[in-house]
Amino acid sequence: MQFIPTSLPEVILVVPKVFEDERGFFLESYQKERFLAAGIQFDFVQDNHSASTRGVLRGLHYQIRQPQGKLVRTVVGEIYDVAVDIRRSSPTFGKWVGAVLSSENKNQLWVPPGFAHGFYVMSERAEILYKTTDYYAPQWERSLLWNDPALGIDWPVAGDGFPILSGKDAKGVLLKDAEIYD
C-alpha cells in the first residue's frame, strides 16, 4: 500500500497493492497499522455506500460540528473526487485537490476532517464506499457551491457543463459566505 501526498499534504491518495490473476483480484483497502504509520490516526465509525449515474455531482459537503474524515473509494465505475480545505487558519484555506477514483485503478482518497468533499460521476454508473471518522449529523451538514468561482474547481463536467444536483447541493453557498468551524 502506498500513501501519496497530494498538493494539499493532509489529503492523501492511497494506492493499494493489488494481487491479480485469472481468478480476479485481492487487495487490502484498510489496514490500521499501515494507516497509522502513514499519519492517518483516526478511527472509523461508519461505512457508507452510494450509487449514482453519469453526470451526478454530490457535494461539496462538510459538517460544522462532528466533522468527518472520509476514506473514499469507487467499487463500480469512475468518479472525479474533490477535497477543499475549509480551515480558515490553514495556509491552504480555499485550495482544492481532485483525483480520479475508479473500479479499475482501485485508488482511494483520504479526506481529513476540516475539508469539504464532493465527487462527479464520469461513468455510466458509479458506486462509492467510504469510511467516516464521525457519525453523520444532518443538522450540522452544509454544502459549498460546486462551481464557486473563488474555488475554481476544474470539474470534468460533460455535455452542457451542468451536472445533476440534489436540491440541497444546488443551494450550496459560496466559500466566502459559508458557515465553517475553525
Image (spheres, rainbow, N blue to C red):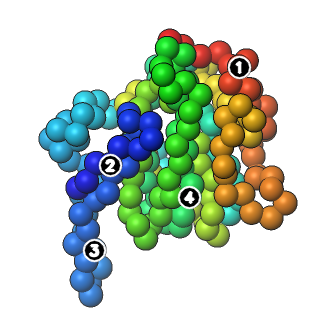
Q: Which residue is identified by label 4?
A: 79
Residue occupying the point 25% across, 53% down: 2
Task: Say which of marks 4 and 1 sits in front.
Answer: 1
Please report contact status of discs 4 and 1: CB closer than 8 Å, yes or no.
no
Say whether residue 116 is left or right of residue 107: right
Above or below, 81 against 93 in this view is below
3D distance between C-alphas at marks 4 and 2? 19 Å
142 relative to 129 in the view: left or right? right
State left or right for residue 103 relative to residue 77. left
Q: Residue at x 74, y 26 (%)?
A: 173
Considering depth in this image, is 66 or 117 the residue closer to the camera?
117
The residue at 43%/70% (across/down) is 104
Which residue is disc 1 drawn over? 176
How far separated are the C-alphas under marks 4 and 1?
27 Å
Labels 1 and 3: the sequence-earlier one? 3
Residue 3, percent from left and from top: 28, 48
In three-dimensional space, the C-alpha distance between marks 1 and 3, rounded to whole angstroms, equals: 45 Å
Q: Amino acid at mark 1?
A: Lys
Residue that badge 2 annotates: 4
Local crowd size for mark 4, using a 10 Å CA cut-off: few (<14), some (14–19), many (≥20) = many
First in sequence: mark 1 vs mark 2: 2
Pointer 4 with pointer 2, Cβ within 8 A: no
Instruction: Where is residue 121? Give x, y as percent.
Output: 62, 58
SS of the residue under disc 1? helix
Dot label at residue 25: 3
